[in-house]
Amino acid sequence: MKKFRVGVIGGGAIAQACHIPGFAAAKNCELVALADPDPKIRKMVSEKWTFARQYSDHASMLAAEELDVVSIGTPNVFHKPIAIDCMKKGIPAMLLEKPIAISLAEGKAIADAAKKYGTRVMVGFSHRFNAYAQSAKAALDKGLIGKPYMIRVRFAHTGPFPGWAKTDWFYNPKLSGGGAMLDMAIHGFDLVQYYLGPVTAVMAKAATLRKKIKVDDNNVTLLEFGNKALGYVETGWTSPSGYCGVEIMGDNGCIYVDYNSKVTMVVGARTADGKFEEKTSVLCDKMNRAWDGEMAYFTSQLGKRSKFCVGLPEGLAALKVALGAFKSSQTGRRVAIS
Ligand SMILES: NC(=O)c1ccc[n+]([C@@H]2O[C@H](COP(=O)([O-])OP(=O)(O)OC[C@H]3O[C@@H](n4cnc5c(N)ncnc54)[C@H](O)[C@@H]3O)[C@@H](O)[C@H]2O)c1
């Protein structure tokens, strides 16, 4: 069996939780090269996984190696230059973390380069690969709750640092481009568009409510969809998760995705005699580890020509909503998304 030669760029938290174990578990991949400027990170990775070679920067890795696939899990500001360097080198497949970039111009430059150099790119929207989100999507696609007209999303945790990321770069606007909005709400912006279609306008407030940091730690975004639907996404870095999930209302019922519990669907109709008949069912009660699903899918698609199920168009669509939300927050105005 052909083994795809893997280069991992950025060996921090997401690489160690998702990218590297995913590649290591895939029978069709071999861990060839790791690029990370931090020797502590390189040592930490080598205590658990064996890469043939390690580099302190992606440029020397690209100069020395012939790779079939790379993953990019660096601070957000480096996504664009590193992604484009890999594309220029002719690497055919890439897993690029979200947000794909920190500005629309950068995001478009990545998409243009992918087209020019023929790179297949998957974006790390891991929520799509959790069993709960997938069961809701399947029910929606089957029309089980009719046409959706309202969606709400809440994701929260206590913040990326300390506890998750290897340094506090998430709190440095020059490295991150923004706080919880670009880190967490962007997952919500991808999911709502996956479920309901394109967001056409936003009104939002991003605020630094609790942490002493220079980026937003909480945000709320009101969404309009062109197809007569509304919604909102609320995310935060300053509380335990509490309620975490997605609720979707449709003509004939609702789906309640509670990440801490299960996915419930309630459908109902009023009968001719005026009675309301309601039926509740559990769509899914076994959560998986979304990152494992994401990597199993990504590695299974290597060597193919088809597009990944979540790629740069979706990465750009979510980024547009996040940047529109920041603009709305700064101006106090509704922002159209095109
Ligand atoms: N999809 C998800 O579920 C998910 C979850 C967390 C983070 N992320 C994304 O993953 C990315 C990394 O976040 P993290 O939590 O792993 O942060 P982290 O701080 O734990 O890791 C970042 C790593 O990048 C390295 N690095 C810095 N500059 C580099 C460069 N120029 N070249 C190569 N490596 C470089 C750092 O040394 C560090 O090891 C971010 O874009 C973040 O938004 C995605």
Image (tube, rainbow, N blue to C red):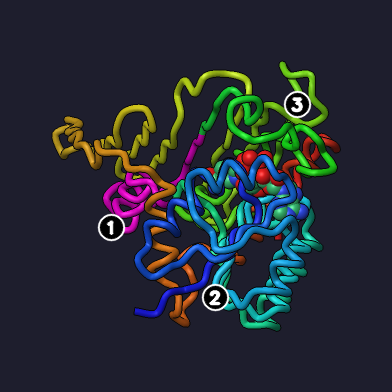
Instruction: Give the quarter of the image for residue 287.
Output: top left
- For mark 1, does the 10 Å Cα neighbourhood hold few (<14), some (14 to 19), or many (20 or more) residues? few
Above-or-below relation of 199 to 59: above
N-terminal of the pair, mark 2 or mark 3, is 2
Which residue is drawn at the image coordinates 44% and 51% (left, top)? 21
Observer-nearest of 99 and 295: 295
Name the quadrant of the C terminus. bottom right
Q: Is residue 246 magenta?
A: no
Which residue is drawn at the image coordinates 21% and 37% (left, top)? 282
Q: Which residues are magenta?
A: 129-153
Task: Say which element carries label 1.
Answer: loop
Q: Which mark is residue 68?
A: 2
- Give the number of the mark in front: 2 or 3: 2
Q: Are marks 1 and 2 in contact (CB under 8 Å)?
A: no
Q: Where does the image place residue 225, in percent across and percent down from the top left? A: 57, 51
Task: Say which element carries label 3.
Answer: strand
